[in-house]
Image (spheres, grey):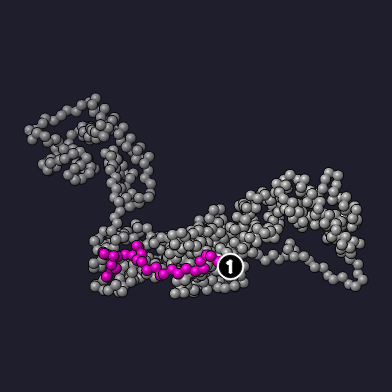
Amino acid sequence: MAANMYRVGDYVFFENSSSNPYLIRRIEELNKTASGNVEAKVVCFYRRRDISHSLIQLADKHAKELEEEKENPTETDLTEKQKHQLRHRELFLSRQYESLPATHIRGKCSVALLNETESVLSYLDKEDTFFYSLVYDPTQKTLLADKGEIRVGPRFQADVPEMLQEGEADERDQSKLEEKLWDPECPLTNKQIDQFLVVARAVGTFARALDCSSSVRQPSLHMSAAAASRDITLFHAMDTLHRHNYDLSSALSVLVPAGGPVLCRDEMEEWSASEAAMFEEALEKYGKDFNDIRQDFLPWKSLTSIIEYYYMWKTTDRYVQQKRLKAAEAESKLKQVYIPTYNKPNPNQISVTNGKMATVNGAGPGAFHAAGGGRACESCYTMQSAQWYSWGPPNMQCRLCVSCWMYWKKYGGLKMPSRAEAPEERTSPSPASNSRPRGHTARQSNHMVPMRNSGSPKSSMKTKQAFLLQATRLTKLARHMCRDIIKLRRAARRPFVPINCGAIKAECKRASSCSSSVVSLAESRPASHAPRSHRTPGLQTPPPRRLLSSLPHGPHGMLGKRSYHHHSRAEPERRSGTCETSRREMMWKNMFFSQQK
């Protein structure tokens, strides 16, 4: 019962996708909507997999600097597996809020600021425990430290001099060290000082009545008198007394000079109503982070002005009213909510038919089952699990067992690096996963991709899309003309090695120009033809075998069909070299002409 009760301030897992890891959030508010559902206003935490690679390098550099500052570094004592799993425990806090349905909560976790005094192994020993040390801004894409620094040194602390001996004179220049603003041993009595302050307030009220901008901001006499009674007026009156050596007549003449009464304003009067509203909105979002308030809301105000206005604003009635309203809202809001355990089946579960779990040799649902298609778990390489889950891209056909699936959902990674998660850190699988499956298991190709099988899981039923590369006749001809330049079998085995297309084009042009010159020579000097023998019409004299050997074999060659009698006929007597060469070049020319047509 207590495990399913969630309160404000709890760190919880949220599920927004059945295949992605859980979101880690901190509950700030629990609100009930008009439809009766409960929504949680949460603070977002980000994992390493959610931020860019450049920021991850920055975070690693920050962690390395912290480790070097320690007296007893422990990072060097960790194994590669512990370092890999420790990255899954690191989070990044953000100032971003969002509202999520409370029904998507999947459990509690623990998130703490990185404690430099503890060993990092303490976070691995505890389940569902995370840590953070940096703040991530998803809008600006920046990382900042989320802790203050101890300001030690002459820039922050004063150097205390040695104590003066009794009767020893102080040789320091007091005017450079401090400035006296009020003398408590002045000749005026307390009654005279109070009377002078009353006159100063009256002058301030009259000055506001004469000022047009002040009459708009304080339209009534009571508001003007209240503004004139603020500390800025009293400080000005006491400073005037001190500068005139506590002479009342001289100080009064300064309060009302020849140009009119002196008007003193503080930050409460200088700020407009719209600026005050923006400040309250920024304070609601960022709290007392005045640097962010100035940067995002009030860039035209100085940091000193914002801080001074904040402490003056806390003395106003508006601050008291807002504090009462927040207290009333907190009383009306939900303090806790009960979320039952989520037990619906995950869509990534691998099953056979009718939504039932796969069974092996008639085993019951609680028995252990072999991996789908004979594949092992992608994380721990086990071959036995009560349930299997499809994981990763569909074309990789990866599986996870129950324990590795829960580790993936909670920590956003695998127990050991895999080919889908980190190819450069992949560990070799166990010999059992490399052994060839036997019996009634799914067939696999040479590239370890399960082939289509009626008994394999649903995820392995997907086939790759096939494509056909149809070459032109000129390309086919170039394969045979440039055998010395391109090795087809070697090029097929190395698909990523580029082929020198320029050399192939040059060879084809040279062969075509050579054939054209020979053909023109043969046409100018026609050769004497031998008398034709009476043969079956339609059968031509076969070309020399040397030419046929260079052409594609098979019933459908590049020169068309040939009958059995044509290939089995005895070769006639060889003619002169010129005639034989001309016939060969004529055949090449015919193939080029057919390509052009």
Residue 222 is situated, as x and y percent measured from the top left of the image, at 73, 53
Identify the image quadrant of the N terminus: bottom left
Residue at image location 25% in from the left, 60% down from the top: 453
Q: Residue 362 vs residue 85: left or right?
A: left
The magenta stretch is 331-359
Along the viewing direction, whichever of 387 and 223 lies nearer the viewer: 223
Q: Main secondary structure of the magenta part?
A: loop
Q: Is residue 468 visible?
A: yes
Q: Residue 448 vs residue 231: left or right?
A: left
Classify mark 1: helix, strand or loop.
helix
Identify the image quadrant of the C terminus: top left
Q: Which of the 4 image quarters holds residue 132?
A: bottom right
User: Vertically, is 306 above or below 548?
Assistant: below
Q: Is residue 22 visible?
A: no
Q: Is residue 238 magenta?
A: no
Residue 528 is situated, as x and y percent measured from the top left of the image, at 17, 28
Residue 100 is situated, as x and y percent measured from the top left of the image, at 47, 60
Q: Residue 70 vs residue 440: left or right?
A: right
Residue at image location 69% in from the left, 64% down from the top: 151
Q: Residue furthest top?
A: 524
Along the viewing direction, whichever of 308 and 444 lies nearer the viewer: 308
User: Vertically, is 35 above or below 342?
Assistant: above
Residue at image location 49% in from the left, 72% down from the top: 124
Q: Which residue is mark 1?
A: 67
Q: Residue 231 vs residue 110: left or right?
A: right
Residue 511 is situated, as x and y percent measured from the top left of the image, at 30, 36
